[in-house]
Amino acid sequence: MDALNNLEPLLRVFWYLAIPISFIFIIQTVMTFIGADSGDGLDADFDGDLDGGNAPFQLFSFRNLINFLLGFSWTGISFYGLITNRAILIILSVVIGVAFILIFFVIIKQIQKLAEDNSFKITSLLHRSGSVYLRIPEKRSGTGKIQVSVNGSFKEVDAITNDEQIASGATIKIVKIESNNLVLVEKI
């Protein structure tokens, strides 16, 4: 610690920020990769709406503070010997700190593009074709079962028809959604 105490005050501030912030950043990164981070921000200790609405991340969060201070402190340390005007050095450090936050936003946005909603919605079956699994009685006199491929998996759904009986193995087209697990089909 004597080495840090012998530095010029501004450089000492940069180092006092960089060391603990880097340690916290490493812990956050490890926790992110093992799935132990439960959220993007901390709960506020005051009455204010910081939940971000429908935003995928918060502007004012602990993670963003760490990202900003990481860019700010290491920029100050890196350019301290090269930039003699301290005001320009601090401005550059702030700009790089903000850039770290923006880079984090871009990375998170790209990761969110990888998300896929594979939940089954019966409305997605409309106008799809499939095959009859259990025969469908004529003119709505009972239900049969059909199989339809949705997002790479087969779904079994109860089916009725307004036409003549449709035998097992026949190819059908879904023309109407009747309820949560019942569709109206016609033979192709």
Image: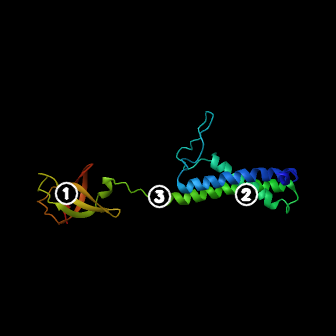
Q: Nearer the viewer, residue 156 or 26?
A: 26
Q: Which residue is mark 2?
A: 96
Query: x, y percentage for residue 176?
Result: 25, 54
Tell me the crowding category of disc 3: few under 14, some 14 to 19, or many 20 or more residues within 10 angstroms, Cα based: few
Sooner in the amino-acid sequence: mark 1 or mark 2: 2
Sooner in the amino-acid sequence: mark 2 or mark 3: 2
Q: Residue at x 75, y 57 (%)?
A: 74
Query: Vertically, is 101 above or below 167?
Result: above
Query: x, y percentage for residue 36?
Result: 54, 50
Which residue is at the far front?
Answer: 2
Tell me the crowding category of disc 2: few under 14, some 14 to 19, or many 20 or more residues within 10 angstroms, Cα based: many
User: In the visual, does 59 lie left or right of 130?
Assistant: right
**SS label for mark 2:** helix
Q: Residue at x 19, y 62 (%)?
A: 132
Query: x, y percentage for residue 78?
Result: 79, 61
Q: Could you tell me the amino acid type at mark 3?
A: Ala
Sooner in the amino-acid sequence: mark 3 or mark 1: 3
Q: Could you tell me the amino acid type at mark 1?
A: Lys
Q: Which residue is mark 3?
A: 115
Q: Which residue is mark 1?
A: 145
